[in-house]
């Protein structure tokens, strides 16, 4: 599992990468009340805004951490956005990508480095 | 915002930290935005049971004159378009200071406490309000009370919780005020609040505030509630937040606060006008205002937040208004907003469009409040 400085996590599973947000991010956001997901089949570049999250406090977005194609999205979050607070590292994944540059994932932090990063 | 060291703390500052609150700067004070329960659950708890709010940042002011309450009321009617002379003893009323253009300088609560008037004003406006009163109330002594905290206990269980400590509060009706001796010194209590729920606002000596708050929180029905849930509660209740839904650019009639201007202060009344901006406000009361504050229910789940531009059509045209408060309503279980639209679009059921992230989203003009008020009248 890898972590970005924007508090996203990436998990490689076969030839896809699953993306979500960390528990730290979910706690900082507060209760999530709205999630807008990208369309399956969309080709995205690193740093493209792909997900909109609204919490009780504010709107924020999730950017694509790597280049690739969106191959699956977690539709369950649309009707139950609160899952993001309940199980951010598990059930509340946001989307799966097929990376076009798999090496990009290695540029991110491992769990120990991320834990240091959030202090 | 200012550095944390510049911020005032309320008499409950230590308690907030002990309760694990997340503190934020607000109107010059370090205030709890949420506790570990979180905004959503705090909101729902307040509507289901009872919530305790620290509102000590608000200004408490006592107004006295040689002629007693009647003289203060006559003087204040020159600043506030409300029937204060006719306010019953130990009763409270909502009102606002208006300016010469008919805009709103602040909204406030005013109470007739027999031989004097007690008012509660917004934290961000209190210095200006006090200067305004000192400048324009000849013969009236304006005393800011700086040694008392202010708590709000809100929700359907509030009466049971407070009456267990002070049986006298059970018989109070909405907007009654009382000054009652207690184990925590004399409490100044009003049956009011800003959540749409039944409840009380309680002024207590600052050195007794912590003990009172702990005694209330010891009750299983009571949770501490932060500013986050306070905002979503008052929004669902259709209540205006000064500096957002009302300010010097909005008249009371545009803001649909005309209900607070009693007949005696309107055209044809015994004490009609005589307050700043009366020409505009009385004209708008008679003829209607060009725009109005409305409730909005956006389609879907995305909140339509403050500042969102509103349009009359799904495509094209100029913005016709904007959202002044918007959030997800935990009790409504949907996004709710308030904003200003032209009179022609202000009818309940009208569709308007708000531009969210570059896309126009439909919203339906909806009667306020979004959740039924639960006052004990």
Image (tube, coloured by chain):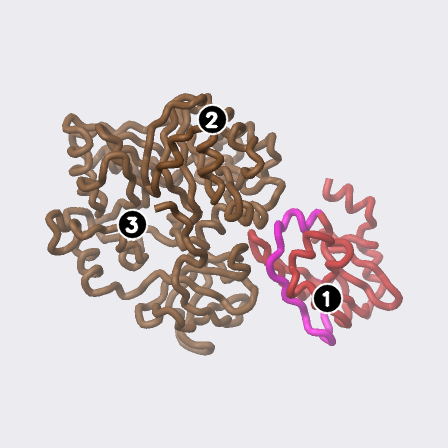
Q: Give the range drawn in magenta.
A: A24-47
Q: Do dots 2 and 1 share one subunit?
A: no
- In the image, residue B265 lies at what x, y percent? 17, 50
Q: Do dots 3 and 1 share one subunit?
A: no
The answer to whether residue B56 is magenta is: no
Name the residue tied to disc 1.
A74
* Left or right relative to A42: residue A53: left
Q: Looking at the image, is B152 positioned above or below residue B277? A: above
Local SS, label 2: helix
State which chain disc 1 sits on.
A
- Quick one: which chain is brown? B
Q: Residues within 10 Å of mark 3 (few under 14, many from 20)?
A: many
Name the residue tied to disc 2.
B209
Whether residue A49 is visible here, answered yes or no, is no
Q: How crowded is mark 2: few (under 14 residues within 10 Å), some or many (20 or more)?
A: many
- In the image, residue B180 lies at what x, y percent? 36, 26
Question: Distance of mark 3 from mark 1, alpha carbons?
Answer: 47 Å
Question: Which of the 4 quarters of the picture holds residue B135?
Answer: top left
Residue at figure coordinates x 51%, y 35% from the top left:
B30
State which chain disc 2 sits on.
B
The answer to whether residue A38 is magenta is: yes
- In the image, residue A14 lies at what x, y percent? 89, 66
Q: Looking at the image, is A71 positioned above or below residue B211? A: below
Q: Do dots 2 and 3 share one subunit?
A: yes
């Amino acid at each position: 599992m890898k972590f970005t400085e924007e508090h996203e996590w990436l998990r490689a599973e076969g030839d896809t990468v699953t993306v979500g947000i960390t528990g730290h991010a979910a706690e900082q956001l507060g209760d999530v009340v709205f999630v807008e997901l990208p369309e399956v089949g969309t080709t995205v570049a690193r740093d493209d805004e792909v997900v909109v999250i609204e919490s009780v406090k504010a709107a924020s977005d999730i950017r694509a951490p790597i280049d690739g194609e969106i191959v699956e999205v977690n539709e369950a979050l649309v009707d139950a956005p609160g899952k993001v607070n309940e199980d951010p590292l598990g059930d509340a994944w946001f989307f799966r990508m097929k990376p076009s540059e798999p090496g990009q994932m290695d540029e991110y932090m491992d769990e120990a480095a991320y834990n240091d990063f959030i202090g | 915002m200012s550095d944390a060291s510049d911020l005032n703390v309320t008499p409950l500052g230590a308690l907030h930290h002990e309760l694990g609150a997340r503190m934020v700067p607000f109107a010059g004070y370090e205030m709890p935005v949420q506790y570990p329960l979180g905004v959503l659950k705090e909101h729902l708890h307040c509507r289901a049971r009872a919530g305790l709010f620290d509102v000590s940042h608000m200004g408490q002011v006592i107004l006295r004159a040689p002629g007693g309450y009647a003289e203060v009321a006559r003087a204040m009617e020159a600043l506030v378009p409300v029937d204060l002379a006719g306010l019953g003893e130990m009763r409270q009323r909502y009102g606002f200071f208006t300016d010469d253009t008919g805009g709103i300088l602040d909204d406030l609560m005013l109470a007739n406490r027999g031989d004097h008037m007690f008012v509660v004003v917004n934290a961000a406006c209190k210095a200006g309000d006090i200067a305004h009163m000192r400048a324009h109330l000849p013969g009236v002594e304006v005393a800011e009370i700086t040694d008392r905290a202010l708590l709000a206990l809100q929700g359907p269980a509030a009466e049971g919780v407070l009456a267990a400590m002070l049986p006298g509060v059970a018989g109070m009706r909405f907007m009654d005020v009382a000054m009652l001796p207690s184990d925590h010194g004399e409490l100044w209590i009003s049956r009011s609040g800003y959540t749409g729920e039944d409840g009380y606002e309680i002024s207590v000596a600052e050195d007794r505030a912590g003990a009172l708050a702990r005694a209330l929180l010891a009750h299983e029905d009571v949770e501490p509630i932060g500013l986050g849930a306070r905002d979503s509660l008052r929004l669902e209740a259709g209540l205006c937040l000064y500096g957002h839904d009302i300010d010097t650019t909005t008249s009371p009639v545009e803001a649909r606060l005309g209900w607070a201007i009693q007949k005696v202060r309107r055209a044809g009344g015994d004490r009609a006008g005589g307050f700043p901006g009366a020409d505009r406000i009385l004209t708008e009361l008679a003829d209607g205002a060009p725009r109005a504050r409305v409730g909005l229910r956006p389609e879907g789940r995305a909140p339509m937040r403050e500042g969102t531009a509103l349009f009359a059509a799904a495509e094209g045209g100029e913005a016709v208004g904007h959202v002044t408060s918007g959030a997800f309503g935990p009790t409504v279980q949907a996004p709710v907003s308030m904003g200003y639209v032209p009179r022609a679009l202000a009818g309940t059921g009208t569709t308007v469009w708000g531009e969210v992230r570059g896309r126009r989203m439909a919203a339906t003009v909806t009667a306020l409040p979004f959740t039924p008020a639960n006052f004990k009248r």
